Image (cartoon, grey):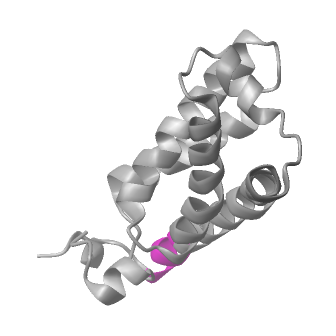
Amino acid sequence: MSYLHGFSVFEQFGLLLLRVGSGLFLAFLHGWGKMTALWGHLFQGDDWGFPNTVASLGFPFPLFFAGVVAIVEFVGGLLFAAGLFTRYVAVFITINMSVAVYRHLISDMRYELAALFLLISLYILFRGAGRYSCDRFFKTDSV
């Protein structure tokens, strides 16, 4: 028995709006800039300061992890919005946003947006993408 039957159409539509809205915001307001900077750094030799930020947090291979962040925020945000492989993507977004919240807290930056993305990704991770998602259409998630 699917758990989706216990939720009304309005609840499912609200979940759709939350997932699509937050996924698109993450992809285009955060990920797109990082993806274009990564592309420019790798293929045009442009300077990109974000790997220095990643290195300051103690991560090894800062360029690699900066690229992972760019991909998670852009591609992951698009997948999150579409509701495709949603729980897997939510794991990566949760990890990414946990590090972002930590970074913002230790550097006296505003952490509210990263914390909000973290909470939304945790909710979707535990709840699932919902009835109106590619996961449901392709039957890649039973909940």
Classify residue 5 as left or right of residue 35.
Answer: left
Q: Which residue corresponds to the image point at 77% horizontal and 34% vertical from the top-left?
A: 50
Q: Which residue corresponds to the image point at 77% horizontal and 60% vertical from the top-left?
A: 32
Q: Which residue corresponds to the image point at 11% horizontal and 76% vertical from the top-left?
A: 1
Q: Residue furthest left?
A: 1
Q: Is residue 74 visible?
A: yes
Q: Is residue 10 magenta?
A: yes
Q: Is residue 72 above or below residue 81?
A: above
**Front residue (pair 35, 124):** 35
Part of the protein shown in magenta: 9-15
Q: Is residue 33 above or below residue 14?
A: above
- Quick one: quadrant of the C terminus? bottom left
Residue 80: give x, y in percent of width and height. 52, 65
Q: Residue furthest right?
A: 46
Residue 110: give x, y in percent of width and height. 81, 26
The rendered magenta stretch, by its main secondary structure, is classed as helix
The quadrant in which residue 101 appears is: top right
Residue 5: give x, y in percent of width and height. 26, 78
